[in-house]
Image (tube, rainbow, N blue to C red):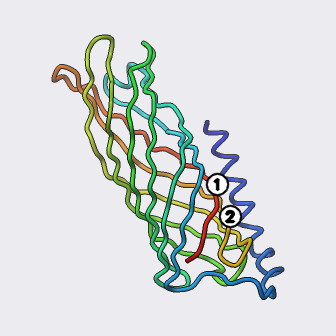
Amino acid sequence: MRKGLGAIVMACAALFAGTAQAAGETSSNSSIDGIHAGDILVRLRAISIQPDVSAGGALGTLGVGVNNAIVPELDFTYMFTDQIGMELILATSRHQVTSNIGGLGGVGVLPPTLLLQYHFNHAGRVRPYVGAGLNYTYFYNDKLKAGDTPVSITRSSFGPALQAGVDVQVAKNLFVNADLKKIWMRTSASANGADLGSLKIDPWVIGVGVGMKF
């Protein structure tokens, strides 16, 4: 998975490197409206959630992992200035927890994330952005068991989040989007009152979608 993520990061870097040339080629096009202070951007993405798992204690000994998931994501960005915006990301997913003794069950993940963004080339057709912020994760509807023993987990966590992406305008108020995020989230587990250790999930979130400007 690390090789795949490396290829994705390199592809994003190549895409961003080409935006300056694309922006120059389109800057004279009168149909470009860009983004401005007070605009609201709404995006709908399909995202691939790829956990980068590390476990401690008994969870590490058991080789605990968390599977990938593909789900929809909705986000809203409010532009405070032509370049600076705040994005709220909303999505939920369900993941199966695995181990070297078999499946441990499923858990729902609700991770609303708030990111402060800087948008480059705000008046152009191709608009890269970067963001950093805070993630809150709530784990719910878990049915985890080790054999016949129920496993309890910590319900919530806070962690940082980083983001890089690009919007490409295709009509006055319509654009397509590609986005890459790294989110840090963790939980811990216990069984019959005994601590089983911590689980860092820390997923990469890769998304593509469409957006509207209001």
Relative height, residue 146 to residue 81 (above, below): above
Q: Quick one: 171 or 104, which is closer to the camera?
A: 171
Question: Disc 2 versus disc 1: distance between alpha carbons?
Answer: 8 Å
Residue at point 35%, 48% (across, down): 137
Q: Which residue position holds label 2?
A: 176
Q: Which residue position holds label 1?
A: 208
Residue 213 lies, in percent from the top left, at: 59, 75
Q: In the image as oriented, which residue stretches furthest toward the left?
A: 193
Q: Which of marks 2 and 1 is nearer the N terminus?
A: 2
* Contact (Cβ within 8 Å) of mark 2 with mark 1: yes
Residue 147 lies, in percent from the top left, at: 33, 11
Relative height, residue 140 to residue 192 (above, below): below
Q: In the image as oriented, which residue stretches furthest toward the right?
A: 25
Secondary structure beneath label 1: strand
Secondary structure beneath label 2: strand
Residue 154 lies, in percent from the top left, at: 25, 37
Say what amino acid the circle numbered 1 marks. Answer: Val
